[in-house]
Amino acid sequence: MSEFLLELFYIVGCVTFIIGLKMLSSPDKAREGNTIAAAGMILAIIGTILFHKTETGEGISNHAWIVAGLAVGTIIGYLMATRVQMTSMPQMVSFFNGTGGATSALIACMEFFASDSGDWGFLLVAYLGIVIGTVTFSGSMVAYGKLDDKIKDIGGRFLTYLNWLFLAVIIILMGLGVFSPDTLGQTTGWILLALSLFYGVLFVMPIGGADMPVVIALLNSLSGIAGAFGGLIYGNRIMLIGGILVGASGLILTFLMCKAMNRSLLNVLIGGFGGGAAGGGAAAGDQVAKEISHNDTAILCAYASKVCIVPGYGLAVAQAQHVCHDFEKRLSDQGVEVYYAIHPVAGRMPGHMNVLLAEADVPYPKLVEMDDANEMMAQTDVCIIVGANDVVNPAAENDPGSPIYGMPVIKVWEAKNVVVMKRSMRPGYAGIENPLFFHERTKMLFGDAKDTLGKLVSEIKTL
């Protein structure tokens, strides 16, 4: 009876995971979907505590440790979730990816070092759990540091060769451990653990700039795959299915991010694009950017028929999503049609701008994907760019020498007027020049995004 009830709890949990994941694809249902999936996980935990039996038929007896772990994890998770700033959300996602990988690696290590089994299937799953979980952990911690500006990009072709060497040694060592387990014995696990730790660091270190959303999506996928191997080790269906869902959805998202950048995953992983060095775009030369005042910008927008707002990481940095929504509402109240053009890789993680604007209660129908926005751009009177840079760079369209050449971007220069809100003329995160700043239709509005948008709202009120 206990086994039946446990399986029933697991089935319900798996169904809620699938329903929740499906609902996450819709912005207006994402929060509800997340709640449903979380409820399913709680059911699975309760079912395991109440009905799980060991091979000897005994139930779980260390309830105090389990409850203590749940309490500590809940408190830490709640504090992190409620206190984290929206600008730090990518770092938080990276941190959680890393903790998931670390957990899976610990599971694999515990079972591997506690077992003397020579079964090749068990050894292969354990090795993969150790390697993928550890790489996910160390890689995610490096990604966290890079996103938080605590770790700088380190490029160079030598890192690419070193990464390939590490990967080859790991694969060869796993093969040796699986097909000749007596050669090194359990030492194989320790060596793989150390190599994977270093490989995760070297794997993420040269990647930066516009590629970081891809890396975060990939690391998220790896954390799920590592969890699936933990499910295989324990024969636990809900761990296996949950890991597969995270791994598969993460891989799909990774490839969608690559498609949005017109690059292959291999090119992202070994190219090291987006480091700190500037260059590769059209040089400014003797061109001079034209400025515009707050009053002129307010008049331009208030008397327009259609206005597009393109949000970027600068919007998150300034924490200006709420005042941006206020700006949009003021224009809408005056009969102006306003929409937001969302680039798939804007910000520092997949869906960063969607999350940011959802926090400010921006109506979901106003969020327009890049391809649809590009079709509307020629009929747009004013395009307001708030903190975006690389995703609106025309060099991606017309400069074969640019590192982002071929990357789909939002064609803001096709609008009748373009206003770029920036603190300065510095390049974006990818470190390349943006010819848009000197385009004949572009005018620059310098200042902090939150302060600038607040002044525009005040100006519009007086019109």
Image (cartoon, rainbow, N blue to C red):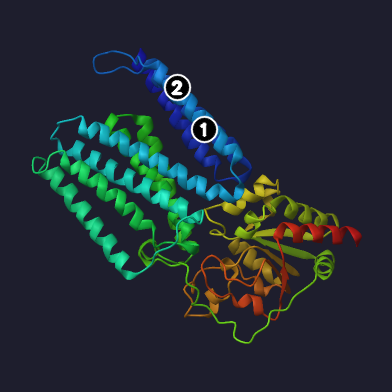
Q: Which residue is mark 2?
A: 68
Q: Position of residue 267 (x, y in %)?
A: 38, 66
Task: Give me the residue at 11% from left, 43% from top.
Answer: 184
Near-viewer residue (145 or 166): 145
The answer to whether residue 265 is left or right of residue 289 is left
Position of 88 with respect to 239 (left or right) is: right
Within 10 Å of disc 1 (Cα), the crowding (few <14, some 14-19, many 20+) is few
Judge whether 79 appears above or below 365 on screen. above
Q: Secondary structure at mark 2?
A: helix
Mark sitting earlier along the chain (1/2): 2
Amino acid type, residue under disc 2 in the picture: Ala
Residue at (74% x, 75% y) in the render: 291
User: In x, y percent, where is residue 317?
Assistant: 63, 55
Horizontal and vertical percent position of residue 306: 76, 64
Residue 309, image x, y percentages: 70, 61
Residue in the foreground of this view, choosing between 378 and 230: 230
What residue type is disc 1 on?
Ile
Q: Dot 1 corresponds to which residue?
A: 76
Residue at x 51% of width, y 80% of height: 399
Cα–Cα gap, marks 1 and 2: 12 Å
Give the image quarter of residue 3.
Answer: top left
Going by the picture, which residue comes out furthest to the right? 462
**Number of numbered tags placed on the structure image:** 2
Secondary structure, mark 1, is helix
Residue 253 seen in this snapshot: no
